[in-house]
Image: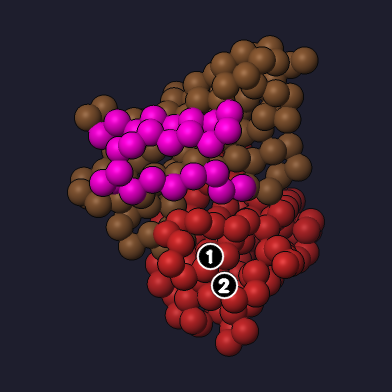
Chain colours: A brown, B red
Amino acid sequence: AQKVTQAQTEISVVEKEDVTLDCVYETRDTTYYLFWYKQPPSGELVFLIRRNSFDEQNEISGRYSWNFQKSTSSFNFTITASQVVDSAVYFCALSDARGGGKLIFGQGTELSVKP
Amino acid sequence: KAGVTQTPRYLIKTRGQQVTLSCSPISGHRSVSWYQQTPGQGLQFLFEYFSETQRNKGNFPGRFSGRQFSNSRSEMNVSTLELGDSALYLCASKRSGAPGELFFGEGSRLTVL
């Protein structure tokens, strides 16, 4: 069975601090996809990134970076120099190789960035 | 480009009633998925439709059903409502060739009294 665990329920930081959101996954598949989604206070979930299981290169996009390590089944997300607008609930998710609309989501980490 | 549109945004029903929720995907997106979001269970997959066919189904009772029309619009129906069905129901559409890249609507918030 597939499972995603986000052990951090809530994180609170002060603006400009770096913050890392942890994600650990379980799957028996050798090919799969991992994702991060953001749900701001307004409610709409927004896709941030996709990684396939064969691509362990770290990815950086502006202040966001992602670290995928198959050896530890982790796909962590770091926000550098956090801003108030980063306040949201962040979800890590997993899908099988078909990459359809069925995602297994973690419970989410609520990030609060205070000015 | 218009986003995913869900109607109604809010609704209140009583136990035993049924409800139908509607979702209009982004133009050109043929895959529509439905999720239930609750504080306790988080985001749970209900089902996915592609070209009017159910492609995948989550672990929900048969009271939850859905369908997709030829214009890719989708509806989900919950019959014999229970208190535990109170949730935010999210619809997401996806274009072909973009694995797992879902575009979500704002959701329909259902309250069952």
> Which numbered marker is on residue B84?
none
Look at the picture and state if B69 lies above or below B26: below
| Residue B44 inside the magenta-drawn segment | no
Which of these two is toward me, B59 or A93? A93
Residue A47 at what x, y percent from top left?
56, 48
Mark 1 Cα shell of 10 Å, populated few (<14), some (14-19), many (≥20): many
Q: Amino acid at mark 2?
A: His
Q: Chain of mark 2?
A: B
Magenta-span inclusion, residue A52: yes
| Gap between marks 2 and 1 measured at Cα | 5 Å
- Secondary structure at numbered mark 1: strand
The amino acid on which the numbered mark 1 sits, given as a three-letter code, is Lys
Marks 2,1: beta carbons within 8 A = yes
Q: Residue at x 42, y 29 (%)?
A: A76
Instruction: State which chain disc 1 sits on.
Output: B
Residue A20 place in picture, x, y as percent: 50, 21
Front-most of B90 and B92?
Answer: B92
* Residue B29: assigned label: 2
Residue B94 is marked as: 1
Residue stretch in magenta: A46-70
- Relative height, residue B43 to residue B77 (above, below): above
Q: In terms of sequence position, does the residue under pointer 2 or pointer 1 come before the other?
A: 2
Residue shown at the point (76%, 42%) measured from the top left: A42
Give the left or right position of residue A49, taking residue A14 as reference: left
Residue B77 against residue B39 in the figure, above or below? below
Q: Residue at coordinates 58% horizontally, 33% vertically from top-left?
A: A62
* Left or right side of A92 for A70: left
The residue located at (62%, 47%) in the rendering is: A45
| Image quadrant in which the C terminus of chain A is located | top right
Badge 2: few (under 14), some or many (20 or more) residues near its Cα, within 10 Å? many
Q: Residue A61, relative to residue A81: is it above or below?
A: below
